[in-house]
Amino acid sequence: MGKKVILIEDERNIIEAISFILSRDGWEVKTHSNGHDAMQAVRDRRPDLVILDVMLPGKSGFDILQEIRDDAELGATPVLMLTARGQQKDREMAERAGASRYMTKPFSNAEVLEAVRDLVGP
Amino acid sequence: MIGSRIRERRVISGLKQSELAKRAGISASYLNLIEHNRRRIGGKTLNRLADILGVAPVLLSEGAEATLIAALREAAARAETEGRAGAEADRVEELAGRFPGWARLLSDLARQRAELEGTVKALTDRLAHDPQLAASLHEVISTVTAIRSTASILADPRPLEPEWQTRFHRNINEDSQRLAEGAEALVRYLEQAPDARSEVMSPQDELHAFLEEHRFHFPVLEGAGGADRIAAVIAGADRLESQAARSLARTVLGQYVIDAERLPAEEMARAVAEHGPDPAAIAAATGVDMPTVFRRLATMPETEAGPVGLVVCDGSGTLMLRKPALGFTMPRSAAACALWPLYQLLTQPGAPVRLRLRQGEARVLALTVSEEVAPARFDRPALYRPHMLLLPDPGPEAAGPLREVGVNCQVCPLSDCEARREPSILGRGF
């Protein structure tokens, strides 16, 4: 496979665990842990998939998602949103902002793998 | 009324007036006058009528306790709306008269049930609306996610390089410690929390529940004579249970009426249509003072002015009016974040501020202005009420850089904040 994924998340230990399982699954994983320059990181990496936490220091995941969707070149990139709040309100916000898929913490590794495989395909 | 009760009993017993009169040894026309409360009766006639009707004379002369009857009727009506019809509501007085003990027990149980339902609802509301609780649960869930993910890697039968294994063991150890601290903080917070009922039902909370129910908009108070209609609005408000809450509501609605007179709905709608929700332009166009324009904007229907938030405090910084909007959270009871530009007006009441704010995921444009509620005297200074209006964020080009603010310190994740007055319960960084 060797597809590229960028994981934007601020919990160090979640980053380590998720990058490990994705790498083992054949993904080329880059990580980024703050909101400020997340968009630049996405531009630099040109990933096949973005995994994006909602609560980030510096900038909200919803804002970053909006910027991705508004970008002419990156607009169509699949984005998997992660959040610790399963509230309907958040789900609606994510859908409105154009999230490809939405996952509520605490998720299992298998769920993450299934979601990223679905979003990018073989 | 004794006559009415005789009539009610007679109808319940299925007796005709003439029949009852005959058996009691009085004329039908006399009984008719009695039943219409035009003749007083007592003594032997009353006893005879009570005997024939099969009730205690005292039930006819005094009736059952009116509040008890009302409570039973209410219980029956409530059961019926819930689809459990079948209580003989027309015989409620008979029940209360014949079995006063049972009737009282029934009414007590109905009241207790309603109270318990209220408590359950209050607790549910608390989970949904308490930012403190939501934030510390978020912290716990985040940690649990890390542990779950790491643990399942370690449990995987596939071989793991020793280096990774060591790292994941260390992570899980760190996270379990964080989880223990987070859970402990949560338990401490829940134990400290005041009695749920009194917390949720503070007069301020009652007032805000009432205002939110109306979305801060009261069309009935607009136009001439609005002041005369305040009492009716308050009387009809189920949310305002305590005397204190009703008194607060009277003050807020009184201000609403004054504002509506200064800046009538039609004029306001025209100004918003022309200038958008821009308080400075509206104030210039209408000649009305800025705090009034703030309040009118915040109390307009969202369909006309878009989402508008407002928070008003007094000279002590206590929040008096809170209308959250645009995802900007305001604490329910405790003081808010000292970085809110609202508080700058406490030291410089004459210096309004226009500033973009970021609070967690929410971004808003904040405008502040102070209202002088009492002029200065030699025995005390002028009294001010700072107002902060929240409008949709127009972006950095239109309004400059963002200021990062919180809700209050307890739920604030910002580290190295010079304005911090107490540690966060979020654990991280403390």
Image (spheres, coloured by chain):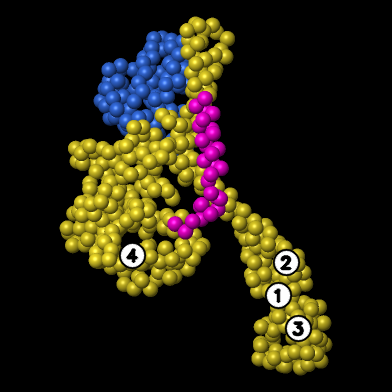
User: Of marks 2 and 3, which one's residue comes earlier in the chain?
Assistant: 3
User: Of marks 1 and 2, which one's residue comes earlier in the chain?
Assistant: 1
Q: Are marks 1 and 4 on the same chain?
A: yes
Q: Position of residue B112 (x, y in %)?
A: 65, 58
**Which residue carries the number 2 mark?**
B103
Residue B385, relative to residue B420: is it above or below?
below
Q: Are marks 1 and 2 in contact (CB under 8 Å)?
A: yes
Q: Chain of mark 1?
A: B
**Which residue carries the number 4 mark?**
B255
Q: Amino acid at mark 2?
A: Ala
Give the secondary structure at mark 2. Answer: helix
> Is residue B175 magenta-colored?
no
Q: Out of B117 and B270, give the one closest to the viewer.
A: B117
Residue B237, relative to residue A90: is it above or below?
below
User: Of marks 4 and 3, which one's residue comes earlier in the chain?
Assistant: 3
Give the secondary structure at mark 4. Answer: helix
Q: Are marks 3 and 1 on the same chain?
A: yes
Residue B305, relative to residue B228: is it above or below?
above
Numbered disc in front, either 4 or 3 = 4
Numbered disc in front, either 2 or 3 = 2
Residue at 26% over, 56% down:
B370
Packing grade of label 4 (10 A; few <14, some 14-19, many >=20) is: some
Give the secondary structure at mark 1. Answer: loop
Q: Out of B257 and B333, give the one closest to the viewer.
A: B333
Give the secondary structure at mark 3. Answer: loop
Q: Position of residue B138 (x, y in %)?
A: 47, 33
Q: How far apart in space, not on screen, are marks 1 and 4 (Cα)?
A: 45 Å
Stretch of the chain drawn in magenta: B177-204
Q: Colour of chain A?
A: blue
Q: How far apart in space, not on screen, are marks 4 and 3 (Cα)?
A: 59 Å
User: Of marks 1 and 4, which one's residue comes earlier in the chain?
Assistant: 1
Packing grade of label 2 (10 A; few <14, some 14-19, many >=20) is: many
